[in-house]
Amino acid sequence: MLLHFMRMQFCKIKLYKASVAANSIFSVLAIYVMFSLYRLLPDSGYSQSYLLQYVILAVLLEQTAATARIPIFCKTVKKGTVVKYYKYPLSLYVQFFYEELGETFFSILCNSPLLLFALIVAGRPAPSVFLFFTAFLLSQIVSILLTLNVFSLTFLLWNYKSSKAILTAVSGIFSGSMIPLILLPKWFTDVAYKTPFSYMVDFPIHVLLDDKPDLYGLILQCGWIVFSYAAGKVIYKAVEPKMNIYGG
């Protein structure tokens, strides 16, 4: 049942993905503009090469993160009704999670040229690459759960624009995707690392680029996943009764 559901969602999601070429062109433009701006800022103590690698990885992580898009289920919520989902045996929350997991999977595929380019430019040893992929995958799960929790407001407001505005602003500031945290004051970085957002972009980048990364962050990523999932179960249990669910 679960495999059938995921396969159905993957097939549906694939129809809406942009081409690999289009994503690659957009990524190159974004990297060029961001790096050109950041290099004009006061010296942060990091080399231009490190900053360029940071920007490349930040663009990759931001484009593949669930926080950068609107969850598919939001488009089915109209006037208090959500359609095209199973009533059982899976809860709506679990269905939404697998749906966004499929979306993330295809997003990573579409950005695979940028991922390969980032790894080549970084030129890091195999252990660092392995740890990066671990942190990268965990960051995607954190992003999905946070996105679902914030967009639960759609069930109450029947509109996802408020959720999108809040999530985009907060995530961009505290994750390092809008402005690299390495360019910001230490006190701000410390505050950012008290939130789950820094573990979506800044932390995976340091895992790859730093010679001695703080791997304790991997445990914290897992902690945020557990906390966000538990919070989501509570949130969706509270808001689901406010919706009419029509499905199989």
Image (cartoon, helix red, strand yellow):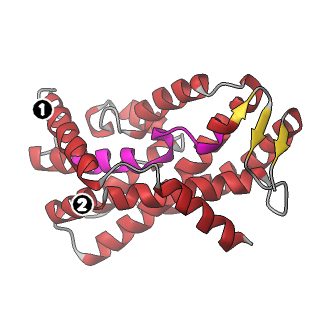
The local crowd at label 1, few if under 14, some if 14 to 19, many if 20 or more residues have their Cα within 10 Å, is few
From the viewer's perspective, tell me whether residue 43 is left or right of residue 164: left
Query: Which of disc 1 and disc 2 is earlier in sequence?
Result: 1
Q: Quadrant of the N terminus?
A: bottom right
| Residue at the disc numbered 2 | 113
Q: Residues within 10 Å of mark 2 (few under 14, many from 20)?
A: some
Coordinates of residue 183 in the picture (x, y in percent):
26, 34
Q: Is residue 141 visible?
A: no
Is residue 232 at least partly visible in the picture? yes
Q: Is 36 or 236 nearer to us in this picture?
A: 236
Q: CA distance from mark 2 to mark 1?
A: 22 Å
The residue beneath circle 1 is 36
Residue at left offset 64%, top offset 37%: 74
Q: Nearer the viewer, residue 178 or 63?
A: 63
- The stretch of residues the image draws in magenta is 55-74
Image side of residue 203 versus residue 77, left or right: left
Compared to residue 49, the image places residue 102 above or below, namely below
Disc 1 element: helix
Q: Is residue 226 above or below residue 69?
A: below
Amino acid at dot 1: Ser
